[in-house]
Image (tube, rainbow, N blue to C red):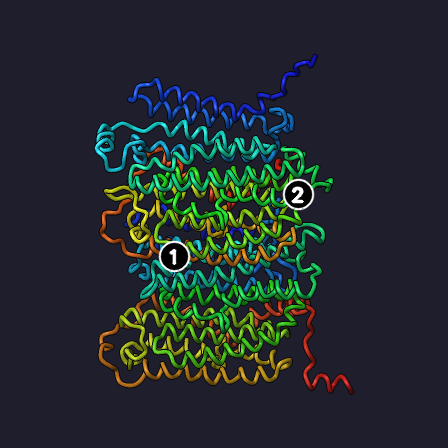
Amino acid sequence: MKWLTSLMLLPLLGAVLVATLPKAKELLAKQLAFGTTLVVAVAGIAMATQFQRDNVDLQFAESHSWIPTFGINYAVGIDGIALVLILLSVLLAPIVVLAGWNEAVGGRWSVKGFYVLILILETMMIGVFAASDVFLFYVFFEAMLIPVYFLIGGYGTGARAAAAVKFLLYSLFGGLLMLASIIAIYVISGEQGGHTFDINALSQLRLSSTTENLLFLGFFIAFAIKAPLWPFHTWLPDAADSATPGTSVLLLGVLDKVGTFGMIRYCLTLFPHASKTFTPVIIVLAVISIIYGAFLAIGQKDFKRLIAFTSISHFGFITLGIFAMTSQGHSGATLYMFNHGFSTAALFLVAGWMASRRGSSKIADFGGLQRITPIMAWAFFFAGMSSLALPGLSSFVSEFLVLVGTYTRYPVAAVISAFGIVLAALYILLPIQRALHGPTTDGNESLTDLNLREKIAIAPVLAVILVLGFYPAPLLNVINPAAAHSIAKAGFSDPLSAIDSKGATK
Amino acid sequence: MTVFVAPSLSYSLLAPILIVLGGAVITVVFEAFLSKAIRPVAQLSVTLGTLVLALVQVWRIRHESSLTAAMGSVAIDGPAILLQATVLILAVLGVFLIADNEHFTVVAATLPGSEEERASIQSGEKLTEVYPLTLFAVAGMMLFPIATDLITLFVALEVLSLPLYLMAGLSRRRRLMSQEAALKYFLLGAFSSAFFLFGAAFLYGYSGSVSLAGIYDAISGGTGNNVFLMIGIVFLSVGLLFKVGAVPFHAWTPDVYQGAPTPITAFMAAATKVAAFGAILRIFYTSFSNAYWDWRPILTVIAIITMVFGSVVAISQRDIKRMLAYSSIAHAGFLLAGVIALNKAGLDASIFYLFAYGVATLGAFAVVTLVRDSAGEVTDLNRWAGLGKRSPFVATIFATLLLAFAGIPLTSGFIGKFSIFSAAYESGNKLIVVVGVLSSAIAAYFYVRVIVLMFFTDPADDGTSVIIPSILTRATIISTFAITIFLGVFPAPFLNFISSTATFIR
C-alpha cells in the first residue's frame, strides 16, 4: 500500500471537499476539516505501526518519474526521523483544528478558506518530510510558504500583513539560496554520471571542498532561517505574534522543524565534510540562540512573543544536538523536535485561549487566573513545566540527551547551554507567577474556564507530554537506529567517554 | 546564355508566414471595402482564423527541417517551429484581448481633445485597423527567429516593429501619453535599427557574407579582421537587445508599456520577446558560437545589470503597468542567462521560459484591462487595494501569475527559472546563477507587495472595480492561468517535446 502518497492525498481531498461547500455552512466546514485531520492522524499512526524500526533504509518508498528531462522523480520514503516528524504533523493537525474552532471568524475571508489552507498545508507538511528527491523537497519547502502566508495575513491579528510579508520574504530569500545550491548539485550530478535528484545518489557525489562548503552554506542558511537560528530569527516573533494560535502551533511546532530536519537529512548527508568544517561556527550560533532566546524571552511582555523567543532558545538546543555529531545528540535533537512540537502547542493553545477571553495577550493584563479559571491555569502551568524541561515531562528527556550528546564532544558548549535551562525556569516561572498567581486583577474576574471542546483538545497534548516523559522508548526505538545511521553516513563515530577510554587502555 | 534557375522556395515550409501575410492582406481589403457595421466581427474572425490556420500548418511541418527554403534565407528547424508556434499561440491570446474595442480610439489621427475626436467617439464606431497591423506584426515575429541572413533579419525586424509603433499610439484614454509612447518607441526603435544595420555592414565587411552560415565559416576560419567582427557583433547586439529591453537599452520599455493600450502592451510584451530572443538565440548559437570568447563577457555583464536593475527599480514603481515593464526587464536578464549558456540545455530552457513567461505576461495584462473606474483602466497600484475582497477570483489568478513571475514552485515560472539557471551553471557561469537567484529574491518583494495590496489591504471606496470580462478576455485569463499551473505541475511532456525538437541546424 502506498502509505505516504495516501497520507498526502487525504488532506488534499478534504481541502477540495471543504472548498466546494457553500460559504454559509461554516460548521460543516469545520467538522469536515476536523474529520479529515482525524482520519489522517489515524492513518499516520497505522503507518507507524508498519514501520520496521531496525531497518535504516528509507521505508514506504515510492518513486515515479515526474520530470524526466531533469531526472526529477516523485520519490518519497522515510526513515525514523522523518516518521517521527510526520507523526508530529498529523497528530497536531486535528488538535489545532479542534482547539481553534472559532479562530477563523475574525479573518478577512470565509471560515472555509481557513480550513482549506490548513488542509493544503498538512499535505505539504507531510510531503516535505517524506520527500526523498531533493527537487520534490524543494517544491514542498517553497510551496508551503504560500498557505502559511495567507493564514497569517488573512486570519491573523495586529500587524498581520507586515508579519506575513516578513515571513515570506525571509523564507524566500533562504529558499532561493538553496535553489542555487540545488542547481549546482544537479549540474555536478550530471557531470558525474547522470542528472539526478535522488538523495542517496547525490550523497555519493565527489565535491571539491570549496564547492562543498559553498553548497552547504546555501542549504544551511535556508534551514537556519526556517529553524530559526540566531541571527536569522527576527521574522519569528512577529509572525507568531500576528498569527492565530493554531497557525502559530503549526508554524513553530511543525514548519520550523523542516529547518532542523533539513540540517540532518540534507546538510549532513549531502555535505558531510562541509558540515564538519562549519560545526564550530554552528555550535557557537546554537549556543548564542539558546542564551539569547532565553534572555529575550525573560524580557517579553506578551505571551505570544514570549513563546516565540523560548522557541528560538529551544531550536538552539536542537541545532546543538544535531551538530554535536553524536548519536545521543541526534536522537535527542529528533526527540526534541517532537516534544517541542507538543509543548509549544500546549503553550500556544492555552495562551491563545487566555488571550481570546481577555482580549489581550499582554502578561501584565492577567493576574490570579488560578482562582478564576483553574483548569486553564493548570494547563498553562503544565505546558510551562514541559517547556522548562521538568524531569518527568517529555522535554526533559530530549534536553538531557542533547546535553549529554554534546558534552562528549563539546563540553564547553554543553556547559554554557546548560545555563539555558536555568534561564528557562525564569522565563516560564515569572509569567506564571504574574498571570496565574497572586490576587485577581481587574478585568479578569469574569473570565470563563475551558469548555469541553477545549479540554478535549488540550488533554491529548498534555497526556503525550507526560507519557513520553516517563516512557520515551516507543519514539526513541524508532529514532535511535536512524540517528546512528545518519551519524555514520556523515562519517562520524561517537567519541568514547572518559571512562570508556580508560577501560580501553587497560 | 545563362539558364534561368527557378528559385527553390518550399512553399509548404513558408506557409505559416504566408498564411499570416495573406490574412493581413485580406484584412486590409476588408478595411477598405466592408461596411463599418460588420467590420469588427469580420476582421476579428479573419484574424483568428488566419492565426489558427497558420498554427495548424506549423504543426503539420513540425518534423521538417530545411535550410533551403526561400533560397536559403530562412531555416526551418526545431527551434523555428517551436518559436513560431509560441508566437502564434500568444497572438491568438493577444487578439482575444485586442477584440475589446473599448481600449482603442476610433480615429487615431484626430487631435487629442479636439472636436473631431469627440465626434468620432460619439459616432460609436470601432477601430479595426488594429487587426491588419497585428497580423503584419505577427508575420514579422514569425520571420525574425527563422531568418538566416542579415538582410532577411532586418526586413523581419522592420515588419514586426513598424506595426507595433503604430499600435502603441492607439489608446482611447490618455491619448497624449499613448502618442508619446508611440513616438518614443518609434524614435528609439529607428535608432536601434540603424545600429543593427551598422553592425550588419561590419559583419559583411568581416566575412564577405550576409548569411549567418557565411559569418560562422569566417569566424571558424579565423582569417578576417577581428576588429570588424567585434564592432559587428556589438552593434548587431545593440539592435537586438533594444527589442528585448535589456539594460542599458531599456529606456523605452516602461513608457511604452504604460502608454500603449493594455491589450497591445500584453501582445507586445509577450510576443516581441519571443521573436527577439528567438533571433538572438539563432544568431548567437549558430553564427557567433565560435566567437563566444568575445561576446560572452559583454553579454554576461549586460545580463547581470539587466536582472539587478529591473528588479531593484521595479520596487519603487507605483503603477502596475510600469511595474510589469520593469519586471519584464528583469526577465530579459534571466533569459539572457540562457543565451550565454550556449548549450543545448540553455536553448531548451530559453524556449520553455519564453513560452511560460509570454503566457503569464498576457494573463497579467489581461487582468489589468479588467480593473477600471469611470475614466478607464486603473493602473495606480494604490487603487488596487482590496481587490481580493471585491473580486477574489480575478485577484487569485493575478496573484498566481505574479507568483509565477517570482518563480515559486508549482508554477511555470519556477520550472523556467530552474531550467535556465541550471543551463547557465552547466556552462560554468556560476556568477550569473548567484546574481540571478539574488535578484529573484529582490523581485519577490514587489510581486508580494502587490499580493499584499490586493488581499491584505482594505478597499478604498474610490470607484475602482473589476468589470465583468468579455468571453474572449475570460478565455485568455483562464487559459493563461491554466497553462501556468499546468506547466508548473506537469511540465514533463512539454519539456520532452522541446528537448527532442529543439536543435538548430546550421
Q: Is residue A350 above or below residue A130?
A: below
- In depth, the one of B473 and A338 nearer the eye is B473
Residue at image coords 56%, 38%: B279
Q: Give the residue displayed 51% in from the left and 46% down from the top.
A: B489
Q: Are marks 2 and 1 on the same chain?
A: yes
The image quadrant where one finds the C terminus of chain B is top right
Q: x, y percentage for residue A476?
A: 58, 71
Callout 2 secondary element = helix
Task: Tell me the subunit letter for badge 1.
Answer: B
User: Within 10 Å of the Cα at label 1, are there few (<14), some (14-19), or many (20+) other Cα atoms?
Assistant: few
Amino acid type of the residue that numbered disc 1 sits on in the rendered structure: Ser
- Horizontal side of B115 relative to B153 (left or right) equals left
Return the mark for residue B289.
2
Residue A393's x, y, as percent? 48, 77
- In front of the other: B470 or A474: B470
Locate residue A129: give its quadrant.
bottom right
Q: Quadrant of the N terminus of chain B?
A: top right
The residue at the far right in this view is A506
What is the number of callouts on the image? Answer: 2
Depth check: give the residue in front, A437 or B466. B466
Give how far apart the Cα atoms at labels 2 and 1 are. 38 Å
Circle number at residue B316: 1
Q: Secondary structure at mark 1?
A: loop
